[in-house]
Amino acid sequence: MDAPIDPRKFPFPPGIPIIGLLAGWGLGVLWPIHFVWPAWTGWVGWFLLIAPLCLAIWAAVTFRRHSTPVNPLGKVTTIVTAGPFGYSRNPMYVSLLLSYIGGIMAFRLVWSAILLVPLFLLLKYGVVGPEERHLEGVFGEQYTDYKKRVRRWL
C-alpha cells in the first residue's frame, strides 16, 4: 500500500505571525490609521507577547519526550496527547496567535489588528488543516478519536 500523500507544505508556521506584525508595522508607516489605545494595552500586550512562549516551550518539550519532531514537516511517529496536547490539539499555534495579539497591543499596530482574521485563516487552512489531514492519513481512527476528545484550539 502506498503512503498517503503529505498535504503539509508550510515549512515555518511562526513566520506567519512574524510577517503579519512586520506587514502591519510597514502598512502603518505608509498609511497610518490614528487610533487611541488605552494605556493598559501596552502592558497586556507585552504579557501576551511573551507568556505564550511558555506554552510553546512546554509543547516542544512534550514532543521531544515522545520522540516526535517539532518540525511541522517532520516524520510524525506518534500522536502526542500528554501535556498541553491534552487540552488543545494545536497549543503551538495557540501560542502563536496569542503572541500575535500581544504584538498588536504592545506595539499598537492597527494594521496588524486588521490582518488578524486573514492571518488566522491562513494558519487554519494553510497549516492546521493540512497537518490534520496528514495525521488522519497516517494514524486513521487513532487520530480521529483524539480529535473527538480534544478541541482544535482551546
Image (tube, helix red, strand yellow):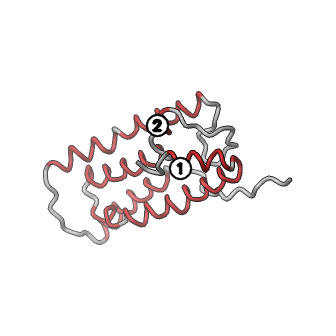
Disc 2 crowd rating (10 Å Cα; few below 14, some 14-19, many 20+) is some
Q: CA distance from mark 1 to mark 2?
A: 16 Å
In this rendering, position of residue 27 left or right of residue 105: right
Quarter residue 81 falls in: top right
State how many labels appear: 2
The kind of residue on which mark 1 rests is Lys
Tell me the tag on residue 148: 1
Q: Secondary structure at mark 1?
A: helix
Tell me the tag on residue 12: none
In this rendering, position of residue 47 left or right of residue 121: left
- Whole-percent x, y for residue 42 in the image: 21, 48
Between 89 and 146, the one nearer to me in the picture? 146
- Whole-percent x, y for residue 101 in the image: 32, 53
The residue to which callout 2 is attached is 84
- Whole-percent x, y for residue 2 in the image: 84, 54
Which residue occupies 57% across, 45% down? 146
Between 8 and 106, the one nearer to me in the picture? 8
Disc 1 crowd rating (10 Å Cα; few below 14, some 14-19, many 20+) is few
Q: Secondary structure at mark 2?
A: helix
- Above or below residue 63? Residue 71 is below
In this rendering, position of residue 65 left or right of residue 29: right
Which residue occupies 80% across, 52% down? 3
